[in-house]
Image (cartoon, rainbow, N blue to C red):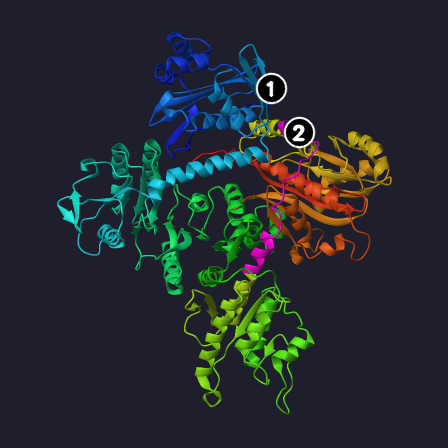
Amino acid sequence: MGAARPVRPAHALLADGRTVEIRPARPEDRTGVEGLYERMSPENLRLRFFGSGSALGRQAARRVCGPPRPGSLALLALHEGRPVGIAEYEGEDGHGNENGGGGAGRTAEVALAVTDEFHHRGVGTLLLEHLVHAARAAGVTAFTAGALADNHAMQKVFADLGLHTTRRYDSGEVRWTIRLDPDEHYLTAVDERARTADAASLRPLLRPRSLVVVGAGGPEGTTGRAVLRDLRRAGFTGRLLAVAPGARSVEGVPAHPSVTALPKAPELAVLALPAHEVPETAEQCGKTGVRALAVLGPRLDAGQGAALLAACRRHGMRLLGPHSLGAANTEDDIRLAAVLTAALPASSTAGVAVQSGGVGTALLGGLARLGIGVSTFASLGDKYDVSGNDMLRWWEGDGRTDLALLHLESFGNPRAFSRTARRVARRMPVLTVDAGRSEAGRRAAAAHTAAASAPAMTRRALFEQAGVIATRGIGELLDTAALFHSQPLPTGTRVAVVSNATGAGVLAADACAEAGLTLPRLPDSLTAELLGTPPDGAIASPGNPVDTSTAGGPGPAECAGRLAGYGGVDAVLAVLVPTAPADGGGEDCETAVRELLRTAAAHPSRTVVAVLPGQAERVRLLHTGDGTALPAYAEPQDAARALAHAAGRTHWLGRPPGEVPELQGVDTEAARALVGAFLADHPGGGPLGPRDRARLLDHYGIPRLPQAWAGDEDAAARAAARLAAQGGGRVALKAHWPGLRDGSEEEATALDLQGEDRVRAAWRELSARLDGAMTGALVQPMARRGTELVAGVVQDEVFGPLVLFGPGGTAAELLADHAARLAPLTDRDVHDLITAPRCAPLLLGRRGTPVDLEALEQILLRLSRMACDLPELAEAHLGPVLARPDGATAVDTRVRLLPGRAHDPHLRRLR
């Protein structure tokens, strides 16, 4: 095994929202670690060391801060620079290095100590999570630990960690064995701890008890003064302060010359300052005891931004922005409105988080026009710290939010976002603007597999996997929000369209079909009831869309009411076109709208929407006196897309979440060792050679065509003799040279070789064609016929690891019939991935015998596991994969590694 990776310092949140730094102990920490033990009570020293006396702490400090010891690692938790906790492990076999290196399958003894004042704040659990991550990277597979039987706190930490543990009692001591292979249970436990810590850390930002506006002076209309005025106008319930040098008061609020001159540290500081003043002011805020910053105003340059973030991490402050519009919380007992918007948001239950200030202003304005208020609003700005993940976790537990609206241009931790979104979307709709769709495809095209998939591999499919409703713009987002806010979800995709104008009904029907909705044929008896007897010479409508313009039956609103009571449709879309004055004019239309509102009120479990062509607003909410609301759209396509989004949510909620299957025959530790050894020899990364590729696939049990490596023509001839029987007597020779990206390129491959002489001749031909660059070749039996497919994984800059699947062959790129899903794949995800391409019916046996779908699923699940286990994996391509009724086999492969990708996305740490 190669040397373990150095453990990088990280900042992370405790259960009470405080920030600590986690890093390895250093020689210069000795005094601080001695102080940690000195601050522990005699009872806690006894529980830690199974004895008493201050000398035990001094000895421990000398050990952990002394020279590096093979097979050991000590991590400190520091709060404002002072150690408050320490976790360490010692390899039981005595092998390793200063970063915890050692052989695969090792166990290590673990110990933990936390100062008394930081008990019950999650310090020990957080340290253990980071220690587990470092130990696994070093090849340690299990921790052992001992605790006195009356050390109930330590036993609870081990029991609640979420890893698989066993324990035994022996003479007043409990011995624990903790397996370090994280599973879904462990990740769920980490998620819950992250949610609790996030919510606690965001309370000073979103529910502050005290607040200061720094930069509140200056003339009327300046940023700080406007924020201060809006805070007063909204009725902020906490203590309000202002910093404005030279002023005694601003907007009726007493002013102070600096943050350090404040009589008491506020929880939140809103900075409305020139960029160059922000870092120093942030440092002053941290020293004063401020818990959170919202940085408004212009963007910071790289140096200013780094200094700002360092101050926040040093002093444990959460940071909104910089380049933010601010934050708002409309709770009656908070009334926070520290936000730069034309109109303050009204109170309701929609949570809004945006990166773009312009989008934030547009969203708030659109929601206000619809009469939809917000619970909380956060303008993330340049998103140095507080992110969309944080806001989702806040809304998950705030007890108010029931609709989440996001506009995110990037995801700092895509896999964490996916897990959080999947969980939150089960409780409330999560809507986003699918910004940068084509750019996401281009980013993913770093590899041939992804390039082939880019046209079909839309971000929308990935959002849907996580339960996020992706819209194409602000207008569509508001259209959909209006429906979710006012109407129940449709139970399916069946829609009945009713209209008082033939052409409008046709347009609505087309819009529904284009949005993926269906218009079922209505029973003849219902059609006759709705349409009555047509006037002489008129042609009766076939029903759905129901055209009341030529019928002698009820009007459109009454028809909508009868359709809403019919169980054969899931939603009713009513198109009400103002008629000519001679036929009753606009008054009839207004009457129909009122009747339609009564219909919606009478059928509260049925989805009803209106289309009112010619209305000034794209969408508006119509209200009755009893609180019923009905969304009315100017265009039928907007109504249809909103209905499609709602029906999609119904479908998503109706499916079980799915589980990540257990896989047999996976050797993760051996795979990590292979990757570590390769990167040790190739620090810049690069493609794996053919033998390493084969070993890596074998470690994950991915079936591949047999192969042998040959360094000269004699070895090639011998290998061909061994392998020919598996390929009908014929073999393929695939040349290799340093930097080769695709061994299937025509000039590097010789196929259908039979006999030793032909293999030798092919070797010489390839060597001459490649002008001596060939360093060897793979010899493989000719593959059996099958359906040609491609599969792979690629690291997307936005979403993290994607698993890709689709047809292979020369037409694959032209057809662009590929699909992608986020890793890790659940059993549901892998089924969706296989059935998503248009070629799926061929796999299911549409024109012949179906292929072995279970074998394909296993390949994709194992690729997913590989991508999750190995963050250094930049790309893995299997193509072609030949699928047959009796299995599936990868013929050609490509794997590329990159260094610096070793961050575990599930490890709790701040950005």
How would you rate the neighbour count of disc 1 (Cα within 10 Å): few for under 14, some for 14-19, many for 20 or more? Answer: many
Quadrant where the C terminus lies?
top left
Is residue 668 magenta-colored?
A: yes
- Count of picture labels: 2
Image spot of residue 49 (x, y percent): 45, 12
> As shown in the figure, which amino acid type bears the numbered disc 1?
Arg
Q: Tag 2's secondary structure? A: loop
**Of the pair 670 and 514, the residue shown nearer to us:** 514
**Of the pair 468 and 594, the residue shown nearer to us:** 594
How would you rate the neighbour count of disc 2 (Cα within 10 Å): few for under 14, some for 14-19, many for 20 or more? Answer: few
Q: Decide which of tag 1 and tag 2 comes sooner along the chain.
A: 1
For label 1, the residue is 106
Image spot of residue 549 (x, y percent): 56, 83
Magenta residues, as a range?
A: 646-670
**Of the pair 646 and 884, the residue shown nearer to us:** 646
For label 2, the residue is 667
Is residue 21 magenta-colored?
A: no
Residue at position x 46%, y 39% in the image: 195
Quadrant where the N terminus lies?
top right
